[in-house]
Image (spheres, helix red, strand yellow):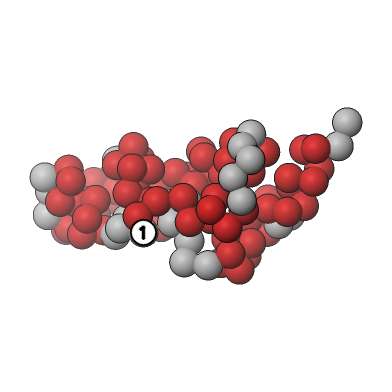
């Protein structure tokens, strides 16, 4: 499921309905499977984003706005807010820290 979320994040099409459709499931079945794994759809998205975020921020020359878009955020401020909540620092702070010797 996480791989499907990763594929759909850049187009901002990563919804419960879309993930379920790609997997050939109904939305309710997707919800039950996630619940059976002790997971939620929001948690699934966060896992997918965490899996990619640091490599995009520190390992690429993409603009941070592009990185936020690739992770499915609607705006740079939404990406900044998520990053701060998850890691205690914004994307620019993380990139700057990674560039220091």
Badge 1 is on which residue? 12
Which sits in the foreground, 57 or 46?
57
In the image, is 46 to the left or to the right of 61?
left
- Residue 71 is situated, as x and y percent measured from the top left of the image, at 47, 51
Indicate whether 22 appears above or below 98. Answer: below
Residue at (38, 43) in percent of width and height:
6
In the image, is 51 to the left or to the right of 28?
right
Residue 43 visible in image: no
The local secondary structure at tag 1 comes to: loop
Residue at (58, 58) in percent of width and height:
65
Q: Quadrant of the C terminus?
A: top right
In the image, is 45 to the left or to the right of 13?
right
- Residue 31 is situated, as x and y percent measured from the top left of the image, at 24, 55
View extreme (top): residue: 101
Which sits in the foreground, 34 or 66?
66
In the image, is 89 to the left or to the right of 21?
right
Residue at (62, 53) in percent of width and height:
64
- Residue 91 is situated, as x and y percent measured from the top left of the image, at 68, 53
Residue 92 visible in image: yes
Indicate whether 79 appears above or below 7. Answer: below
Residue at (73, 54) in percent of width and height:
92
Count every numbered label the image shows and give the total.
Answer: 1
């Amino acid at each position: 499921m996480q791989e499907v979320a990763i594929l759909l994040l850049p187009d901002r099409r990563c919804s419960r309905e879309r993930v379920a459709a790609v997997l050939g499931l109904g939305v309710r079945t997707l919800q039950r499977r996630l619940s059976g794994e002790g997971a939620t759809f929001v948690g699934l998205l966060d896992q997918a984003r965490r899996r990619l975020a640091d490599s995009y921020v520190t390992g690429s020359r993409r603009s941070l706005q592009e990185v936020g878009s690739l992770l499915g955020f609607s705006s740079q401020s939404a990406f900044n807010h998520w990053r701060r909540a998850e890691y205690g620092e914004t994307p620019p702070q993380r990139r700057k820290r990674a560039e220091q010797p």
